Every structure is written in C-alpha cells, then in structure tokens.
Amino acid sequence: MRANTKIMALAAAGALLAGTAQAAAPAPARADLLQKLSACRSLTEDGARLACFDEATAALDAAEKKGDLVVMDRGQIREAKRQAFGLELGGAFKIFDRASADGGKSEEIDEVTLTVARASRDREGHWVLTATDGQVWRQIDGERVNEAPKQGSKMEIRKASLGSFFLKVDGQRAIRARREQ
C-alpha cells in the first residue's frame, strides 16, 4: 500500500509540474522596458502620456547605461556577426534573427574579408593568420600557399561544408581553415 501511495504522490507532483509549465506565460518578445514605453502611446491625456514617456525613456536610458539592456541597430548587429564569424557559438545569435518590419529576414554572414596583421606557421607547417581585428585562423589541410601571407595581405574567408571554412590569401588557391579566436 505504501508503494502505491508513493506512486500516486509522484504522479500528482508530475501533473502539477506539467500544469505549471503549461500555465507559465511565454517569454515576451520584447524587453519589459520597451513594452512599457510602447504602452505610453495608448494614453489619451497629453500630460499623462508625456509623463509616461519621460518615465519610460529615463528607465530605458538608465538600464542601457548599467548594461542591463543593450540596444543595437542593424549595422551593429551585422558587425557583431562579422566579428563572431567562424566561432562556434551555437544559437547565440538567434536573438537577432527576427524578421524586420518590411518582412525581410536578418542578414546571414557567409563570408568576410580581413587584413593579415601577423602570419606564422605551426609545428606541422600550417599557416596561423592573425587579422588586424584580432581574429586568429589556422589552416587545417595540407594545401600549399604559393606566396606566403604577410602583414597587409587580404584574407577572404567563406563558409564551407561540415563547419569548416575556405580561406584565400591575396586571391590564391583556397585552403581549409578554422577560427581559433
């Protein structure tokens, strides 16, 4: 009889948890502070609407200055994606994949062009290229580069299959590479 009571209690707890999970409201699509700002537009009395806007914008400004809220335009998002190109971040940038008001999708970065700041070879003879923005790319295949990369060389990197990338230095034959930093 005791085992039966434990099973019933576990079943009840499971049902309660499942109900709680279903009842929980989905995460809002917008930050609370932005929703509060948008809600000010619905106020019809001018003084109340102005006071609401003043309070909401002050809260937004304070949250942004503290780092609790980040506001980015498309250009800043594109630059963040460009800087992260080649890193394995999982779904970290999915937050930026919202459709725009005109129905367009967020821009996908498939290739970047960088400038070599430093070029060296590792113990296996593979090239390790550091770009002027700090990105580090390492050759992962045995292809030869006819002309050694040097400071100021142009690196063109594009996505390849299976998570690797093709890297061309100064328009030469592409080598496979992966990003390290």
Image (cartoon, grey):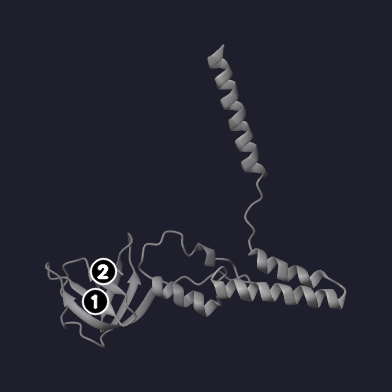
Residue shown at 27% from the left, 72% from the top? 137
Residue shown at 74% from the left, 77% from the top? 54
40 shown above or below 147: above
Residue that extends furthest to the right in the rendered view of this protein: 45
Horizontal and vertical percent position of residue 77: 50, 74
Q: Is residue 156 left or right of residue 77?
A: left
Task: Tell me where residue 141 sits by quadrant.
Answer: bottom left
Horizontal and vertical percent position of residue 168: 27, 77
Provide the residue designation for mark 2. 177
Cα separation, mark 1 vs mark 2, equals: 10 Å
Provide the residue designation for mark 1. 129
Is residue 71 in view? Answer: no
**Camera-side residue: 5 or 129?**
5
* Total tally of numbered discs in the picture: 2
Q: Amino acid at mark 2?
A: Ala
Residue that extends furthest to the top in the rendered view of this protein: 1
Task: Tell me where residue 53 sits by quadrant.
Answer: bottom right
Q: Is residue 114 left or right of residue 141?
A: right
Task: Tell me where residue 55 sits by quadrant.
Answer: bottom right
Q: Tell whether label 2 touches label 1 (CB within 8 Å).
A: yes
Q: Amino acid at mark 1?
A: Leu
Horizontal and vertical percent position of residue 131: 29, 80
Task: For the C terminus, give its image quadrant.
Answer: bottom left
**Camera-side residue: 62 or 131?**
62
